[in-house]
Amino acid sequence: MGFSLTSTHIIFFIAAVSVAGIVSGVFVTIITDITGSFSDKGERLTGEIDTDFGIINDPDNIPDTGGYYIFYLKNIGESKLITDNETFQLFVDGDLISKSNYNLTPEYIYQSEVAEINVVNTTISSGTHQLRVVGPHAIADSFQFTIQ
Amino acid sequence: MGFSTVAATAILGGSCVLMITIFTGGVLPTISDYHEAYKNMEERAVERIQTNINITYVTNTSGIFYDLNVTVKNTGRITLKTVDFTILINGTKRAFNCSETYLYAEKDVIFTVNLTGTGLKRIKIISANGISDYEEYIVE
């Protein structure tokens, strides 16, 4: 009888500790995942807020040099911008320009620096057009210009 | 029975402390970074509203290679760093010199651009935060 009572207590003890351990483990894992996701989301939002750029060309004088129209992109945000045709997508009058038809120099720009977007001049006809540049975090700027 | 309850409560209590530590350790720096970024964005927006520049005077020196001197007045309230300006002449970005490091409110600075060729020169000057002004000038 005495042995049964001890056994019962031991079984209860093991069961209680096991259940508490499992519940704790599950909750700690969930909280770790939530915290990780929250941090990632926070980083993305911070990056989005820190990113800003503008196209600063003279709309009536788009330079045409070496077979390329040159558009100037100024970093007016806080963060460094990686300037390549993977990060930046161009739309002219709503049509996506193929990556093979433009490039950006230099590779990155810091705050207040200017990058050049070189667009193959056969991709844009004469007349008035709308250029939309979409950069990191889907931050975008639009610019209306006229090719003489 | 009582000892089992104590042990389970201790495990759950300990895990609660661990969860709070993990959550605050991960979330608080994120909130702090976000707050900082938001504050910077707010400052940038205010600075943009309070920035204004005007090209007040343009002259040129003589010769085939001449200097175009562009006088710019800060008509806003923000002090601007002259090295962060961009100058476009007839749409093309040009290198320039400026005698002053900062352009203070209500003050003028002269930007000097080395050029060739006569005719109409359409000048666009852009500040670090994207505020700009245009002027046209004929070089004879």
Image (cartoon, rainbow, N blue to C red):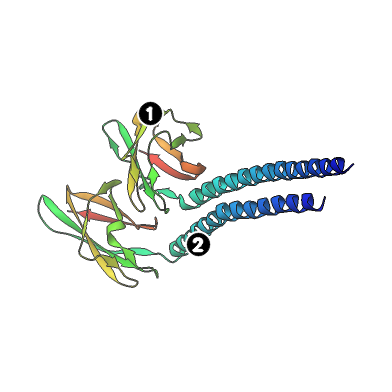
Furthest toward the left, the residue is: B63
Q: Position of residue A78 (x, y in %)?
A: 42, 54
> Foreground: B90 or A99?
A99
Q: Is residue A38 left or right of residue B107?
A: right
**Left or right of residue B83, residue B15 in this image:** right
Find numbered disc 1 in the image and state the secondary structure of the residue it sits on: helix
Q: Residue most toward the bottom?
A: B106
Q: Position of residue B29 (x, y in %)?
A: 52, 56
Q: Position of residue A106 (x, y in %)?
A: 31, 40
Q: Which residue is mark 1?
A: A101
Which dot marks residue B39? 2
Instruction: Name the residue located 40 percent from the left edge and 64 percent from the top edge.
Output: B51
Chain where mark 2 sits: B
Name the foreground residue: B34 vs B53: B34
Left or right: residue A96 versus residue B66 is right
Q: Measuring 78% from the left and 41% from the top, which residue is drawn there?
A: A15
Number of marks present in the image shown: 2
Q: Chain of mark 1?
A: A
Residue B126 screen position, x and y as percent? 34, 55
The amino acid pointed to by label 1 is: Asn
Asked whether residue A61 appears in the rendered view, the answer is no
Q: Is residue B78 above or below residue B38?
A: below
Q: Is residue A23 visible?
A: yes
| Crowd class of label 1 (few under 14; some 14 to 19; many from 20; radius 10 Å) | some
Name the kind of residue labelled 2 in the image: Lys
